[in-house]
Structures are given as C-alpha cells and as structure tokens.
Amino acid sequence: MIQTENLKKIYRTDEVETLALNGVNIEIGAGEFVSVMGPSGCGKSTLLNVLGLLDTPTEGRYAFDGQEVGDHSERQRAKLRKGNIGFVFQSFNLIDELTVYENVELPLLYLDTPSAERTERVEAALDRVQIAHRRDHFPQQLSGGQQQRVAVARAVVANPKLILADEPTGNLDSTNGAQVMELLSDLNEAGTTIVMVTHSPADAEYSARTIHLFDGKVVSENFIEQEYAAHPGT
C-alpha cells in the first residue's frame, strides 16, 4: 500500500535549511499495523504528513496504493485523501461548535454521501467506539478519552484504507490510552492498515512492526510476534 524510495523533505527559510527526511525507504503492506518511533525532531511527524498527502516530498518517490503521488498537486492530493485516509491526532482536532454526531459526519459531507447512508455510517462508527450515548454532546463536554474515541470514529466513518495516528494517546491517561490502542488494534484486525507515530514503547507493542527514525533516516526495524502484538501484556 505504501512505498517510498529515497524520500527527502527539506524545509528552507532565508537563513536556514532543515533536512527533515533524508532518504527514507519504507514499504508497508495492506493490513499492516506499523509504529514509527524515534526522538523528537527525527522526522516522524513529517513522514506521517507526507504519507497522509498533507505535504509533498522535496525529492524521492512515494507510491500510495500502487499510484505515484509524490508530485501530485494539492487538489489531486485532497481528492485522493478523501475516503482513503483517516487521521487521528494527539490533540483530537474536533470542532467545538459541532456535536459528536456532527464531527463524525463531517468527512461524509465532504464526500457528498447521501443522507440515509450518512446516518447509517455515523451511527455504526459511534457504536463501534462505544460513544453513541454521547452523540448530542459537544467536545468540551467530554473527557479526553471520549474525545479521542470520537476522533477515531471520525477517522473510520468513511471506511478508509489507511489510518494515520500521530501520538494518539499522548494526551490521555494510561487507562484511556489503552482503550484507544485496543480500538486501533481492533480496526487493524478488521483489515484497516494503520501507521502510528508514538514515543510509547507500550503503544508500539500493539503493532506488528516498528520503524525507528533518527535524523530523518530509517536506522532500524523490528518485528513483534503477531499474537503478542494483538494483546500486549499477556
């Protein structure tokens, strides 16, 4: 599903040039759950932004689902993101003025999904993350764990092929964090590809493979036994 070749990302200002990604070569198959780890500033979030078509590489090749996308325009990238990629962020990124239901419905409005189908999909997504009882509440009326459940529901409501999660438990306590990780694990077991940036070794244990970055480069990879990855701590 994901292939990069000599991927580079350079940020330039008048005085400074920053090499955020330096020749990244990775391959992630459909249905994998992969964690990306490394120290702050190593390029993890930059890599996630490029993979999520939120940013373009300066050099190198990026193919998503068999399609070369590295040189796509913003309009082309936006079109491809819709319905194919879901995002889960550390800060939830919910819209305060919208209810839980309306936040989850938003991606389907962008896709011009018919009303009856929207209702069915939103209700199914809310049930899936066990937050349907809060459907008419606003984000500020929810706990952090509940807000992240809503964010996960929003990410999956369009049945995307890929979910990109950037520190999804970073603002949660251990109990709520574990619940969110179980949700992501369940989604992966149902067939969704997941790439997650994390600083947490415990969270990384939910994935089957961990890619380690340092100074914008892949320095190592390690694999986790599948049974252990699905149920860390057992």
Image (spheres, helix red, strand yellow):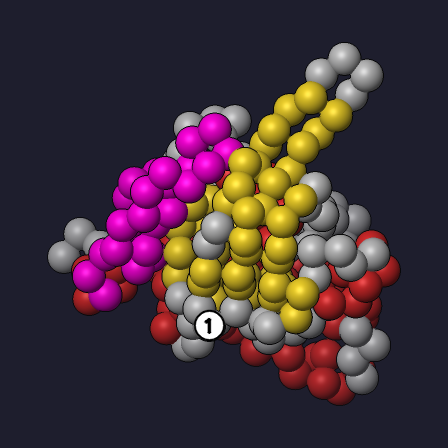
Q: Is residue 153 above or below residue 177?
A: below
Q: Is residue 29 above or below residue 197?
A: below
Residue 58 counted in the magenta span:
no
Residue farthest toward the left in the current orientation of the protein: 234
- In this rendered view, identify the residue nearer to me: 108 or 13: 13
Q: Residue furthest top?
A: 15
**Residue 211: image location, x then y, percent:** 38, 47
- Label 1: which residue? 30
| Magenta span of residues | 200-226
Q: Residue at x 64, y 24 (%)?
A: 18
Q: Answer with left or right where residue 138 lies relative to residue 87.
A: right
Question: What residue sits 69% from the left and 21% below the top?
Answer: 17
- The image quarter in which residue 31 lies: bottom left
Query: Is residue 76 in view from this perspective?
Result: yes
Kindly identify the amino acid type of the residue bearing the numbered disc 1.
Ala
Tell me, yes or no, whether the highlighted magenta stretch contains residue 207: yes
Give residue 81's position: percent from left, percent from top: 71, 64
Q: Nearer the viewer, residue 101 or 62?
A: 62
x 46%, y 37%: residue: 217
Locate residue 64: give its quadrant: bottom right
Give the SS element for disc 1. loop
